[in-house]
Image (cartoon, rainbow, N blue to C red):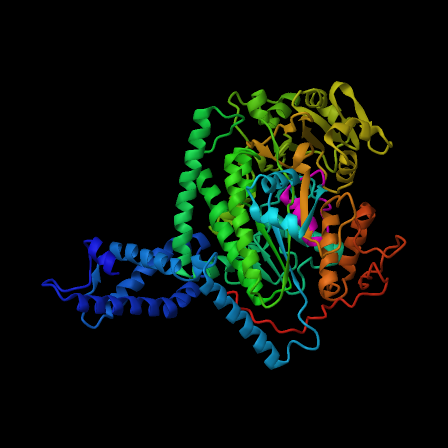
Amino acid sequence: MLVLAGILPDFRLQSGDGESITRVGLTAAWGAGAFGLLSALVWPLLVRALLLVPALVLGVLVFFLNGSLLLMALRLIPSGHGEAAPETAVVVAAVMSAVASATSTALAVRDDEAYRRRLYRLADRRRRRRRGTGADGARPVPPGLLFVQLDGVGHRVLCEAAAGGVMPTVADWLEHSHRITPWRTDWSSQTGASQLGILHGSAFDVPAFRWYEKESGEVMVCNRPASAAVLQRRAVARTGNGGLLILDGASRGNLFSGGADQLALVLSVSARRGRANRSRAGYFAYFSDPANAVRTAVSFVAEVCREIVQSVRARLRGDGPRVSRGGLYPLIRAFATVVERDVVVAAVIGDMLAGRSAIYADLVAYDEVAHHSGPRGRDTDQVLARLDRSLALLARVAEHAPRTYRIVLLSDHGQSPGETFLSRYGLTLKDLVRAGCGLPVSRRAGGTPSGAEARAAVLAALHRPVEEDEEEQPRPGRREPVVLASGNLGVISFPDIRGRATRERIERAHPALLPTLANHPGIGFLLVDGVVLGPGGVAARLPEPGEAEALLAPFGPGAAEAVRRSDGFPHVPDIMVNSAYDPLTGQVHAFEEQVGSHGGLGGEQGEAFLMWPADLSEPDPPGPVGAEAVHRVLRGWLRELDGPQVPLGPARTAATAATAAAAEAADPASAEAREPGGRAAPAGAAPKDPRSGAPQSGIFPSAGVSVPDESR
């Protein structure tokens, strides 16, 4: 305060005729003390009063409210000599909060021994409190599991970053404590399908990132809160289980809740309005400390400037392929790489200090930057390095938690590079479809905007609905095809045809469409009514063994099986289009404006990673196939550490059981509730331990341990 009073003309701590330095120092001490006291007493009440304010608006209001508290503090000085202009008070309060942050736990967590000793005292206090209440029981508290999802980081990218010194923490874990394996995604290699399968055990009937459902007339989009809620309900009904985190779990920064009770930045519940929306609690818990708002704001501005500089540099160098990085993208990137990262990491730290059993957090920074800068390069290396520092921070905090934690790293998909379809061929997939149908095509080609998760998270934080392009919303009686893009996977639906259109019906209505698509050099193959169509009139029927395998062999192992599984989905689009793929360069052509893309088959986008502590059991080689297999591996680790998981609530109702039975009949290979020998388990029956065959009790042995919630 003394320094600021000497620098700023509209801020003073002495009378006009001057005073001794001792008197000025005493005035500053009074002002600082009053400001600190008001911040401690009034600030939490202000935050609770603002629960209905959009979360990011709160981050801006922090500065003005903080300045108001400083003005109040100056009026409490007994001498009455302290005063400041309102706009100056905002600056003074922000600087004071930043200084407080730098000299206390907010920034000292990385290397300050005082902070480490404080964590030791907090952890020791919790242990003594549980011993005093007899909560520890006869057995020690079992280890917890922290799952950290590095969104979009492929297996090769992670290994290269660790070997190249970009991620030293990951490299150290791989050398001393962890093992790693790749796992193969489904055809829909995107966060919606993968995370739904990982957290809820079912990725059934998620054909793409966005698709059209004829019976409802709605476009489903995985990063739209309303759609995410529907997908989560369908997965729960199919499996009869609430999710991976149903017992004492926390879900942070995800599309889906995983059944957790502790939620922050979870998209499937962000459509709720009012105080019941617990997903936004992470923002308010984080911004309840003004120092956090100051630190994040400074980092936010720095990230915006960094993106602008990197974009200009790439343009001057003539880097290619390249997409537009202007407009709101610098702000969206800064939100994903700074705001969302800081809030999620802070929430996870609170979860660990509260001793929760299972925590699943998604860090989306790399995925957002890779879409616009490409999967490899200086831009993404900087993001990976910052993510590595976040992992190191979580590991250090875990040392002081009331229970030990096993940290599991994983990703939901990878990224494949390549020039966009529009940039390479001068037209969009929608233009090509309209030309094949004999419909007019716009003379001016416009790109399909990126559908990355960060954009939806920003809109949810601002209480803004996630809207699709008006042209993508089918109108009543519309006869034109609906064309939607999901990375290098495109889907086409005909609203005027009830049910799934047959190949004969499409050829009768639009004779030139299928040949136009199949023979285009930027398209690899089509799926139409159980038949895979390739260039030159090549057709492979999925029921015939070997036909699809031969046609889809260039797209990697398991491609035919992934396409065959999607063909059995109830909401499979009439035509599914996968872009061309060059096995030599690993490049694809995204139908969205992305130079690093995922969503279909081809290249590293389908090769995610799973990295686990060596003292946990190893997945069957060569690694899990499909997100549902990853779910079973993670659930097995939870069982190893703390016993079987509890299924969703009471026994399933007859309607839920019928829904699940119908889903299992449509896709028996992915049914969750199976008895040994392949027989379907009765509805509502308790799951059986795969090792002993005995019914699982569905209860953690440590379920009765009382753990205080100290996340705030």
Residue 586 appears at what percent x and percent y? 65, 29
On screen, residue 611 versus residue 47, left or right, reads right
Q: Quadrant of the N terminus?
A: bottom left
Residue 697 appears at what percent x and percent y? 78, 68
636 versus 221 height, above or below: below
How many labels, in total?
A: 0
Frontmost residue, 1 versus 590: 1
667 versus 443 height, above or below: below
On screen, residue 353 versus residue 138, left or right, reads left
218 versus 671 height, above or below: above
Q: Residue furthest top?
A: 536
Quarter where residue 690 is shown: bottom right
On screen, residue 110 versus residue 126, left or right, reads left
Residue found at x 81% / y 53%: 661
Q: Residue furthest left?
A: 17
Quarter where residue 154 is shown: top right
On screen, residue 85 versus residue 128, left or right, reads left
Whether residue 465 is visible here, answered yes or no, is no
Quarter where residue 502 is shown: top right
Residue found at x 42% / y 63%: 47
Q: Is residue 515 magenta?
A: no
Q: Is residue 191 magenta?
A: yes
Frontmost residue, 109 versus 317: 109
Residue 283 appears at what percent x and percent y? 48, 57
Residue 290 appears at what percent x and percent y? 39, 59
Residue found at x 53% / y 34%: 377
Q: Residue furthest right?
A: 677
Frontmost residue, 281 versus 576: 281
Stretch of the chain drawn in magenta: 186-205
Whether residue 673 is visible here, answered yes or no, is yes
